[in-house]
Amino acid sequence: MAKRLLDCTASELAAYSAKELLAAIQGSEGRALAGECIGITQPLLTDVTNAEVVASMGADILLLNMFDVKNPVIQALPPVAPTETVREVKRLTGRMVGINLEPVEDTKTANDDTIWQMSEGRRATAENARLAADMGVDMIVLTGNPGNGVSNRAITESLRTIRAAVQNRMILAAGKMHASGILEEAAESIITKEDIRAFREAGADIILMPAPGTVPGITMEYIRELVGFSHSLGALTITSIGTSQEGSDVATIRQIALLCKMTGTDIHHIGDSGYVGMALPENIMAYSVAIRGIRHTYHRMAQSVNR
């Protein structure tokens, strides 16, 4: 039987199946923290990966954004074969690792910004999902970066294809933190009960939605209703800060954390754009303390990866 995620050691996590990881998350009763980070940018601490910093501040799950499975790059990672990139991150941090893949619609114009510009290895395809599974990725999150034109319909279609390709080898999460360039899916239209049902039927284990207070019109009451609906369908949830508020002051982070706690969410997510590439370290720790106190936060921060 899986232990609670917040109690798991690195060796225990490494041995868990996708089903056991989901049980470990659920058993933590709303006290699991996911920290998003970018590996292709200059690391905050130069010769330490952003993933290691995020883990050191209390995150239980590392979510690698803009990770290209065909050209994997994590700046400051020790030299390893490309296929071993994710496993090396897991070895150094002792955390479960997820990646974002983006169901960018061909009919939409993806953001051509040099930072957010799409690459083939970041697209939400069956081939990329299989490559991710082979690399040791524990979870794929189907979502969109700013301006990349990811719609809920495209997420549903990609979910169905990827679930068929990977079966039960990994956890699949789906949803959006912001409109992602689809203006008709802004505010409360970012995610609805109809979207959640479609995601679940297409194979999603976890439903992703904006954290209250991060997107205009997204209230605690609205997200609480969607969380309850997701749970009624047997899916877990993750509330996400994807609006650069991961770079806000600590008081704002604590407020968002408690609002998310009130929604009943299973996983709390803090984004990667405080500094470019990760949240402010103090905000990761503050979020962890707000949802589970100092005891569990220090326990996660202090526990050796060699256990």
Image: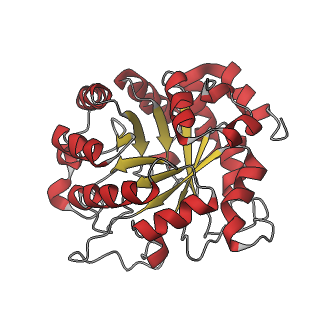
Give me the residue at 24% from left, 60% from top.
Answer: 151
Q: Is residue 181 above or below residue 207?
A: below
**Number of marks in the rendered image:** 0
Does any portion of residue 38 appear in the rendered image?
A: no
Between 217 and 169, the one lying in front of the other is: 169
Q: Say whether residue 192 is left or right of residue 298.
A: left
* Residue 219 in which image quadrant: top left
Which residue is nearer to you in this view: 161 or 96?
Answer: 161
* Near-viewer residue (75 or 45): 75
Name the colour scheme.
secondary structure
Quarter occupied by residue 125: bottom left
Q: Residue at x 52, y 29 (%)?
A: 23
Q: Position of residue 185 (x, y in %)?
A: 19, 54
In x, y percent, where is residue 102?
38, 64
Position of the N terminus, as image quadrant, is top right
Decide which of 297, 282 is in the foreground and name it. 297
Residue appearing at x 25%, y 28% in the figure: 229
Quadrant position of the C terminus in the picture? top right
Percent x, y for residue 278? 58, 54
Camera sees residue 268: yes
Instruction: Find residue 295 and report its image quarter.
Output: top right
Q: Is residue 75 above or below residue 168?
A: below
Residue 208, how many percent across, how many down?
36, 43
Left or right of 55 on screen, residue 78? right
- Against 16, residue 178 (above or below) is below
